[in-house]
Image (spheres, rainbow, N blue to C red):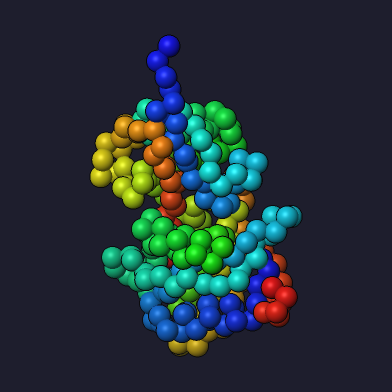
């Protein structure tokens, strides 16, 4: 069995979504890409799904994902590879009129 | 939300300073056991919208990360946002509803008429994102907040 230890990453949860993670501000999940990690997260905490994904099962427009200090939009998007110990942050952008 | 007179005054002041454009920023604080946002301080931000800043505002992900870092330095969290409505009522617009991120944040709006801040209201996004609900503002003295 290959070890999966190397692909355990920490996901940082924004304050209002912690009601869906039993109050946890960070959640450790396994995943080799951002998509893997986020899908595992919403499987574990189903209430998060509608907040992160739209009707087309894509990340909502205002949901930005960072790996460390890097916005995945400037990497490989949700296919951005992860290494063990990476910190993945869910970061909202906000607009209005 | 629960907050202090100083926080409300600071939001009004930012609305006045930004006039005739919309001013915006983040509400920092904690969440009480019953899920109410307790706002103890502000983090001002720039209105990043590229144009028409009299009618639109934008806070980028980098702005959020900066506010989040400032919050953590004070052992606080980002619990909401605020913005001003120059010469418009302190009620969410259709754009506000369409662009709002997560339920659970407190969204404060201050109306500013001719440069003078007027009404200040707080709102929360319905879990199904269909509408905003008016949120009660409880004002405590700074000592107890």
Say which of B7 and B12 sits in front: B7
- The image quadrant of residue A72 is top left
Determine the residue positioned at 45% across, 31% down: A8
Q: Position of residue A70 (x, y in %)?
A: 31, 47
Determine the residue positioned at 69% across, 73% down: B145
- Asked whether residue A1 appears in the rendered view, the answer is yes
Q: Is residue A24 above or below residue B131?
A: above
Q: Is residue B23 above or below residue B97?
A: below
Give left or right: position of B108 versus B17. Answer: right
- The image quadrant of residue A59 is top left
Q: Position of residue B125 (x, y in %)?
A: 59, 54
- The image quadrant of residue B74 is bottom right
Quadrant assignment for the C terminus of chain A? bottom left
- Asked whether residue B83 appears in the rendered view, the answer is no
Q: Position of residue B81 (x, y in %)?
A: 51, 64
Can you name the residue that lies furthest to the top here? A1
Say which of A19 and A83 sits in front: A83
Say which of A26 and A53 sits in front: A26
């Amino acid at each position: 069995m290959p070890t999966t230890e190397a692909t355990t990453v920490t996901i940082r949860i924004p304050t209002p979504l912690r009601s869906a993670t039993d109050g946890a501000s960070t959640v450790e999940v396994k995943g080799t890409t951002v998509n893997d990690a986020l899908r595992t997260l919403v499987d574990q905490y189903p209430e998060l799904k509608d907040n992160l994904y739209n009707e087309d099962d894509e990340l909502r427009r205002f949901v930005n994902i960072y790996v460390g200090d890097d916005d995945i939009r400037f990497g490989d998007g949700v296919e951005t590879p992860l290494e063990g110990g990476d910190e993945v942050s869910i970061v909202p952008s906000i607009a209005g009129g | 939300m629960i907050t202090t007179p100083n926080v409300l005054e600071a939001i009004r002041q930012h609305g006045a300073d930004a006039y005739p454009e919309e001013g915006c920023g983040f509400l920092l604080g904690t969440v009480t056991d019953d899920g109410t946002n307790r706002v103890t301080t502000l983090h001002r931000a720039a209105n990043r919208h590229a144009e028409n800043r009299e009618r639109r505002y934008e806070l980028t992900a980098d702005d959020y990360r900066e506010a989040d870092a400032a919050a953590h330095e004070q052992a606080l969290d980002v619990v909401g946002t605020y913005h001003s409505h120059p010469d418009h009522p302190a009620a969410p617009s259709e754009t506000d509803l369409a662009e709002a991120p997560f339920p659970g944040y407190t969204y404060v709006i201050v109306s500013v008429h001719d440069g003078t801040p007027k009404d200040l209201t707080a709102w929360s996004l319905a879990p199904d994102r269909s509408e905003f609900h008016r949120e009660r503002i409880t004002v405590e003295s700074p000592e107890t907040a």
